[in-house]
Image (spheres, coloured by chain):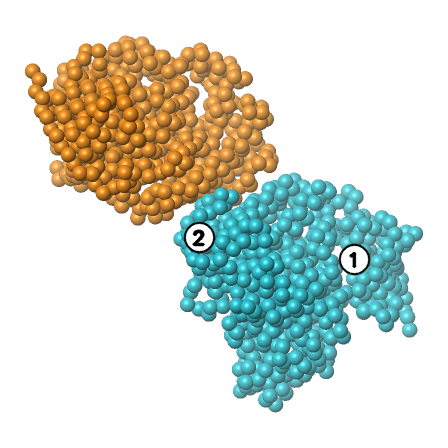
Chain colours: A orange, B cyan
Amino acid sequence: MKITAVITTIVCCLAVSGYVYAYAGDGSNLWLPGPEKGNASVLLSAKSTPTTDIAVRELSDYWNGGKVLLEIKKDKESKRDSYRINKSDGTTTITAPSDIGLLYGTYRLLQMQQMGRTSGDIAISESPFHDIRLLNHWDNLDGNSERGYAGRSIFWNVRGFPDAIGENDMAGIANSPLNSEKYARANASLGINGTVLNNVNASPKMLCTEVLEMAAKYADVLRPYGIRVYLAVNFSSPVVVGGLKTADPMDKEVQKWWKAKAREIYDLIPDFGGFLVKANSEGQPGPMDYGRTHADGANLLAGAIRPYGGIVMWRAFINNPTDPDRAKQARIEFEHLDGQFLDNVIIQVKNGPIDFQPREPFNALFGALNHTAEMPELQITQEYLGQANHLAYLGTMWEEFFDEVRQYADYTRHQLSGRYNAIAGVANTGTDADWTGHPLAQSNWYAYGRLAWNPNLDAETIADEWTSLTFPELNESQHSTLVSMLMRSREAVVDYEMPIGLTHQFGDSHYAPGPWDNRPIRRDWLPVFYNQADADGIGFDRTKATGTDNTSQYHPDFGNVMEDISSCPDKYLLWFHHVSWSHRCQSGRTVWEELCYHYQNGLNEARDLQRQWNSLEGAVDTDIFHDVKIRLMTQTRDAQWWKDGSVLYFQSLNGMPFPDFLEPPVHTLEECKNSNLNVGLYRSPGHEELNRVR
Amino acid sequence: MKITAVITTIVCCLAVSGYVYAYAGDGSNLWLPGPEKGNASVLLSAKSTPTTDIAVRELSDYWNGGKVLLEIKKDKESKRDSYRINKSDGTTTITAPSDIGLLYGTYRLLQMQQMGRTSGDIAISESPFHDIRLLNHWDNLDGNSERGYAGRSIFWNVRGFPDAIGENDMAGIANSPLNSEKYARANASLGINGTVLNNVNASPKMLCTEVLEMAAKYADVLRPYGIRVYLAVNFSSPVVVGGLKTADPMDKEVQKWWKAKAREIYDLIPDFGGFLVKANSEGQPGPMDYGRTHADGANLLAGAIRPYGGIVMWRAFINNPTDPDRAKQARIEFEHLDGQFLDNVIIQVKNGPIDFQPREPFNALFGALNHTAEMPELQITQEYLGQANHLAYLGTMWEEFFDEVRQYADYTRHQLSGRYNAIAGVANTGTDADWTGHPLAQSNWYAYGRLAWNPNLDAETIADEWTSLTFPELNESQHSTLVSMLMRSREAVVDYEMPIGLTHQFGDSHYAPGPWDNRPIRRDWLPVFYNQADADGIGFDRTKATGTDNTSQYHPDFGNVMEDISSCPDKYLLWFHHVSWSHRCQSGRTVWEELCYHYQNGLNEARDLQRQWNSLEGAVDTDIFHDVKIRLMTQTRDAQWWKDGSVLYFQSLNGMPFPDFLEPPVHTLEECKNSNLNVGLYRSPGHEELNRVR
């Protein structure tokens, strides 16, 4: 049965000159189309649904390239959310097997128009690589957002939490039609089709009926945009919320509790996506508290929601080390469980083996499981890359990751082998006017979405797209300047924070430098553990020959190259090797010179980012210009702290003179050590004023 | 009658290797000879005096170049403190018309030995250019030192002052034989022959009998070294100390009081040098309070001490402007009084017409008086050149001054025309272990002394001498590095503080930048008055054509060059001209670019000073190295504040983009404005610890 509804809408073009318009200065519009200017007739050749309604409305509002036909064509070969766009003879047709495919095609077409790529004929066929494309919001019910640097949670603001969930209040998108729509549009425009509404360090109260009812409201808002709701759950929920005596996965009452809870959830949210679980990690409860395995725990939840089509994403960020090398831990802990997980369990693995550092090789767990689905967890929020103060476009970092797993972890084969094919990104959204704190950090939300759809896209293409969509007012040379800024930015952070394979050199805040940090806490939380620096040398020996044998965890094509110091690239040198300060790098410089070179280069690059941005004054909105300018200023100051603190600390160990090219420090080591907290907590001047809450 | 005393002393050489030795790390030894190593026989062919005793002792302790003969030869042609040194056939003879000449010759010979210049024959004849070579100590009885940045007063620490002068206590050199001797030796080694013991903002109580008795003790300590004591006096002393109703110079009682006071002083200090007076300036009382002139006031004091051979140094730093251009004021105020002063009055004139700025043209009062002696007042303490935190060797600044007055103010002729021939330098001494706060600021005390003796010496020669004497441990290349640092240092300060003729851009502290300062106080105390910057241009118009006609105050050879914008050198451009931001400088850059260029260059130079100093690690004493290193670090940070604050403020007026070569600011204008106090007050880290009080 096929019903064809024909809706023709013509909306007058607003008074904007051509296609070029500047958005409001608060950055709230993201990369979405600006002031309405649609003037086209839109024909829907399909049953009207809330989703097709949105597609038609978006086209009516913004498309001005003539007639558009939206058509559903079922096609067993094609994924449900794929689409085709064809334009010839002035008519554009979007074809898809489903309404959501039509919506995705619609957004793509509008983006092409914003980028000025719709003048000639079009013939596009798009199908997503990952089927499940998720945002993970580390948001707490009390309104705080863990590792969020853009204000407060956009979902939760439960007054009186945790004592009084009953008298609750939902802040953020659900209370604001404009913003809930914008959040949904922004995600749908990238193809993001799921969102975990709360922190992986999950409150058990998340599963209270009152909170589930709130989640259901979000689900209703997001559903028409093809976005499913997921929840992070606490493994102890049966005890805390259910009043049981145990959360042991083998306990019948526990199993019954989860089944009942699943039923309750699906009654409220029929298309509920599933659970995300952080268990037996950093103090969170889990099955091992009861002598069970990760598989036992994951299967408990997976079994409860399997009847409804839900999935369980079980995180492999374990962080309770049983091996002296934390980098090996995830693979050690999960490889032997392969085959024991139910088929709706996905192991969610951070891209790198440590923790979202500015540069890490890929986690050796990728490609290691033959009977269990795996999904990458990327971090969009810049916990370790300058938070909301620094510019760090992560497209380049993720491109590096996908290049590696494609080449050395059989990523493509694994993901397409019939198992769940998913990806998650830890969101950088908050209540700041521009959603992301740093206006240019919107590019990371965008880049994540694009790579979730197609991990083969290169970072520069994405940066180019985002810049065109977000700053259409720039001329060609200004556009190139901004793209160039994005493309250089992450390497700059690597350079001034932790070059040539150093990792986790942070103070407590995960912001300020702390290479000297040697407090009496767990060794594998300490910078000195990761740099292993002393009078003679520096670096963490992960070789088979003399170290932790992390290299053997990898495919030989990767592991052997890393094992051999003569082939290990400089960028991973101190990750895999402990070397003397006078060791000669591939660059020709000694390790000491190479470190100094990169720290200095990072500072120079930060200055150059300022210089590049300043050249855009007058070309971009004044408020945005000023906001970013101040943040870049802060970034350069921080780069100076990082450079000074790092070279001074390492010099205090090796006693070697600074190379001539190093700008002498302007802070003492003592000042760097003491500045830790202040640097970590300061926000860029004017931040409060700039980031007026939406 | 001629008595010849022959004293032969042989002192064994201490266990030092050759002539190269490093001094104790506290810098307290200044440029004086280090550990004793004399091994020569010294013959005095003259009547023994306390002064010849010192000469003999110094040679006995430190000279190891064979026999030395000290001989007094009266000679009407020669100045009393001139000397000759001749060395041939292994015997060295120092000849002078007086014992002090012998002592000066002795120090010179020892310096030549320290510099390794005594191996061959020697034939030197030296006679000082200025007859009166003074230090002015701006020290208060309560122990504070105005514009002192090296601790507290070395002379005064009167407990309970000002209420209880009776129960006094003299701190500093008089209480420490070692330090009183070192202060005297240091000055005598340069030929400094007078010292004003107290601040020009003088307490009337300075003339209390109790305080005069203290001054007499200092006079006793300094006398053998040829150093006379002078006092700064308050014009109201007859009222405050004497209990009179007026200090009117025409009042008979007042005249009587000063005569009696003079007698009292000369009873205590028979060789008392005279008075220094700051009158009717910055709130100080003076003759104009009674409708009298500077001449009336000066003559009152001059008359009182004339019978004893004393002089009055009457300061021309008036600072109660009657002309809209403060630069013209000194000449306006004193020129018409020429001829009215007694012959023992000297007008003491700051080198520049404003106030000890990093760069000023010479004061137009120089050369303007035909019947009155004038003397320059130089400022050794770095009130406006980074105080004790920045390296600024002032030899180059003073060389510039002497070059100008020699060329355009007939300095040589005036000074040698039979009138008093004097010079004063405002001391940079304090109770810090190294005397001067910044260890390298000792070079300014040294340079002042050398130029007071011979203003034709060039700055580099002096820097070279001082470096050889103070850091004999440096090899040739290290020596050159330090000399190069000194030689570049003042221009670096000019560049980051106030380039191309800008002046007095300071905040309240005379340390931090304040180009925006526009408080409701006297206009001619404000940076905005001196920069005259607005949207269109910048600079103070002192031309005859359109400005204040300051140029006509100068000799035409100078004034005409300054008047004509095409010949006015860039370094004085904004001093003499108000120009548009796009005015083309002689450099080829616009004024805006030129300003930015210099601010940036100043910052770059500060960094390079750090780099140069760091290359001396291990070569100089560890404590001194660390101390200077920290100060240079502070200097670079300050240079950053100066550069950022200045370019941001001027940009806020002219709206012009920064040139590409300018490193983008890392502080906001608001931060620069707010940092004023903090920057002004902070001392380099570790300062308290480093500057242990002697």
Quarter assignment of residue A450: top left
Which percent across, then down, holds residue B540? 52, 64
Tag shown at residue B651: 2
Residue A415: tell me if it is visible. yes
Q: Is residue B359 above or below residue B201?
A: above
Q: Residues within 10 Å of mark 1 (few under 14, many from 20)?
A: some
Name the residue at 70% across, 78% down.
B371
Of residues A322 and A177, the one drawn nearer to the viewer in this rendering: A177
Query: In the rendered structure, which amino acid carries the disc numbered 2?
Result: Gln
Q: Out of B578 and B503, give the one closest to the viewer.
A: B578
Residue sitting at x 86%, y 63% = B95
For label 2, the SS is helix
Residue B108's disc number: 1
Tag in front: 1 or 2: 2
Horizontal side of residue A455 vs B692, given as left or right: left
**Residue A599 percent across, percent down from the top left:** 50, 34
